[in-house]
Amino acid sequence: MTITATTARTLGRTGLQVTALGVGTAPLGGLYSDVPAAQAVEMLDCAWQLGLRYFDTAPMYGTTRSEHLTGQVLREHDGSHVLSTKVGRLMTTERAGRRLPPAPPKNPLDPGWHNGLPFREVFDYSRDGILRSFDDSQQRLGMDRIDLLYVHDIGRVTHADLHDHHWQQLTRGGGFRALEELRAAGDIRGFGLGVNEWEVIRDALEEAELDCSMLAGRYSLLDRDAAEVFLPLAEARGMALVVAGVFNSGILAKPREGRKKFNYADADPQVVARVEALRGVCEGHGVPLAAAAIQFPMRHPAVTATVIGAKTAAQLRQNVEWFDTPLPGAIWADLDAALERMS
């Protein structure tokens, strides 16, 4: 069966039907550059018109801006969508006399926001923090229905020396228990992690029954880190998997010219060389590199959907075109061989 961008796929034991291509809304928070509100609304409306019905957002994106914009658009449609957001960050303001925890160290995977709203994140993975985050997201979205919650950016790469503290909040501090209570009450259909580190999802599977998790950047045409151990584990444990970051911060979707990002930072020459080797294979088959990148994760049986962000309606249409581009079967072995030669 050929999978297209709008193919309905069952998201594991949640029973939710998501489109194979989901809409990521991090760019609407001002990722790398400003995104005017009218442009963001046009992109989201275009996604609906094209038949995409899975939308993912987070309080982090634009320090709540993305949730506001996503809710504004989805409220105007018929409700036949699946919506996920994330927990683990509370948003507050710096005010005179207010006692706040020290600002967290800069997250190496946080690119910053060009036109985000004037709030500051406070990490809180405790039971009360998770429940408050859920309530706050409902209010920002203007919707009483959120289908999926992902625990956002838990992990050692994100938190360094503070990881153990946050992990204790999530486990002994009742964070997972809060998510289980929301699921049991029917307030959400499922939960999991939304992270860039597959190792922490592996650890979380020993603490809670995860329904679905979102993994960004670690299973892509360029980065196969999760392939050998994690994807078979997810499949064996019955946890659905949504893959994000398939362009690895844009380098797999960009032309040869211009500045190239990899994992939210400027790409080093070795990464650029590997990308150009992959591009050469794709050009030899007469297809765009981005089409291979966007379709690559969907070949694995553990992966239900791919989520990709867009700043404009034109970018979104391009993503759909790449997702639906027919690719010759021989291209995958040729791409693997190109990477092997570069290793």
Image (spheres, rainbow, N blue to C red):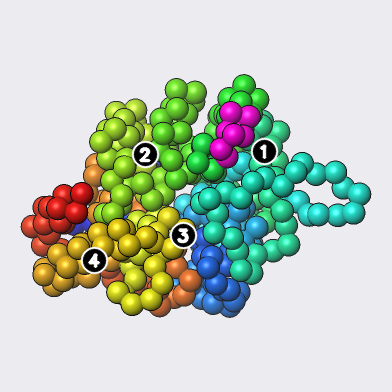
Residue 116 place in picture, x, y as percent: 65, 65
In terms of secondary structure, where does tag 2 sit? Answer: strand
Q: Secondary structure at mark 4?
A: helix
Q: Please report the residue visible at 48 percent of the width from the left and 71 percent of the height from the top.
A: 311
Secondary element type, mark 3: strand
Q: Which residue is mark 1?
A: 124
> In the rendered image, which quarter is residue 267 located in?
bottom left
Q: Earlier in the sequence, mark 2 or mark 3?
A: 2
Q: Would you name the residue on which mark 4 appears?
A: 276
Task: Determine crowd level at label 3: few under 14, some 14-19, many 20+ residues with C-alpha closer than 10 A.
Answer: some
Mark 2 and mark 3: span between their CA atoms? Answer: 29 Å
Identified by mark 4, the residue type is Glu
How far apart are the alpha carbons under marks 2 and 4? 32 Å
Measured as percent of width and height from the top left, residue 150 is found at 52, 42
Which residue does the numbered mark 3 point to in the structure image?
265
Q: Residues within 10 Å of mark 1 (few under 14, many from 20)?
A: some
At horizontal 37% and vertical 34% (from top left) the residue drawn is 239
* Residue occupying image coordinates x 47% and y 58%: 264
Q: Main secondary structure of the magenta part?
A: helix
Q: Range of the magenta residues? A: 159-166
> Does 9 appear in magenta?
no
Q: Earlier in the sequence, mark 4 or mark 1?
A: 1
Are dots 4 and 1 in contact, CB under 8 Å? no
Residue 156 is situated, as x and y percent measured from the top left of the image, at: 51, 36
Q: Indicate the amino acid at tag 3.
A: Ala
- Residues marked 1 and 2 touching at CB (< 8 Å): no
Gap between marks 4 and 3, in whole Å?
Answer: 18 Å
Horizontal side of 104 relative to 306 (left or right) equals right
Q: Mark 2: which amino acid?
A: Ala
Left or right of 225? Residue 244 is right
